[in-house]
Structure formats: C-alpha cells, structure tokens
Amino acid sequence: MTTMNPYFNFDGKTEEAFNFYKSVFGGEFLGGIHKMGDAPGTEDLPEEEKNRVMHVSLPIGGGTILMASDNCPSMGHQLTEGNNVYISLHPDSREEADRLFNELSAEGKVEMPIADAFWGDYFGSFQDKFGIHWMVNYNAEYNRNSEK
C-alpha cells in the first residue's frame, strides 16, 4: 500500500506555518523541528539560514502526515508560490468541515466559501495565509457508506 503525505516548502516560514497547523489539527511534531544549522556540513550557511527548518512532520489523523522544509537561497533554492497543489480534506462531519475551513482560512484568501455545492457535497476552497491551497469537502453519503 502506498500512502501520500503532503510536503510543503516555505521561504523561511515553515516553523510559523507548522505551529499554526498544529494549533488547528492538534498533535505533536514527530521528532521535533530540525534546523538547517543542526545538519553536518552547514557551517558555511549564512547565519539567517541556519535557523531555517530542514524538516518537520505533523500527523493530522487518518495516517496522513504534513511535512515541510524551508528553502536555502544561498544554495540556489527559489520558492514560487502557486496554485498547482491543493490539500483536500475530507472531515467526518459538517461541524468539523466548518471548523477546519474557518480556522485554516483565517487571514487567507477564500476562493469558494464553504456551502452546499450543486453536486451534493458541502464544499469550500481557499488559500491560507502561507500560500497553501486547501479544499474542504464533506459528503454525508460517502461517510455513511465508509462506516459500513
């Protein structure tokens, strides 16, 4: 079986973003937050990059783990925020859909307010304050069938 875990890249905002995601989903970081300056061979990194995040993992339920790192401009890394990746969340209730949508979209940009959609689901989409695109989709019929 293959699992899929979203992996985000940020330009120096990973720790801030993941503390925010932790406030929404709860839980603890797996193994803590690893910094660039803690890795062997990073002695020559500029001081401002040594405190950037090399890796962080946050379990958010259902076997899914959000993961991320910061880029290192001195190593030629460039970050381009785009709309080519969405994280699609499928909560177990309408109430949880509302909570996730409202908390994750705070200070972000709502694309489609969460509401009953023409295809029968309760759906909304947005870009969070860190540039990550999310969809929240609750389907009562799917949840009833998956419980059987």
Image (spheres, rainbow, N blue to C red):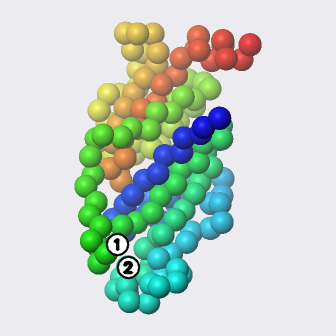
Q: Quadrant of residue 118?
A: top left
Tell me the residue at 59%/10% (across/down): 141
Q: Which residue is mark 1?
A: 72
Q: Residue at x 47, y 70 (%)?
A: 53
- The three-letter code of the residue at mark 1 reads Cys
Q: Residue 75's spot in the image, x, y percent?
A: 31, 75
- The relative height of residue 15 versus residue 136 in the rendered view (above or below) is below
Q: From mark 1 to mark 2, how far is it between C-alphas?
A: 6 Å
Q: Where 24 sits versus 145, above or below?
A: below
* Quadrant of the rendering where the N terminus is positioned: top right
Helix, strand or loop under label 2? helix
Q: From this view, report whether residue 10 is shown above or below residue 143.
A: below
Q: Is residue 23 visible to the viewer in this orientation of the structure? A: no
Q: Residue at x 48, y 69 (%)?
A: 54
Residue topped by disc 2: 49
- Res. 133 image quadrant: top left
Is 91 drawn above or below residue 4 in the view shown? above
Q: Quadrant of residue 104?
A: top left
Q: Is residue 72 visible?
A: yes
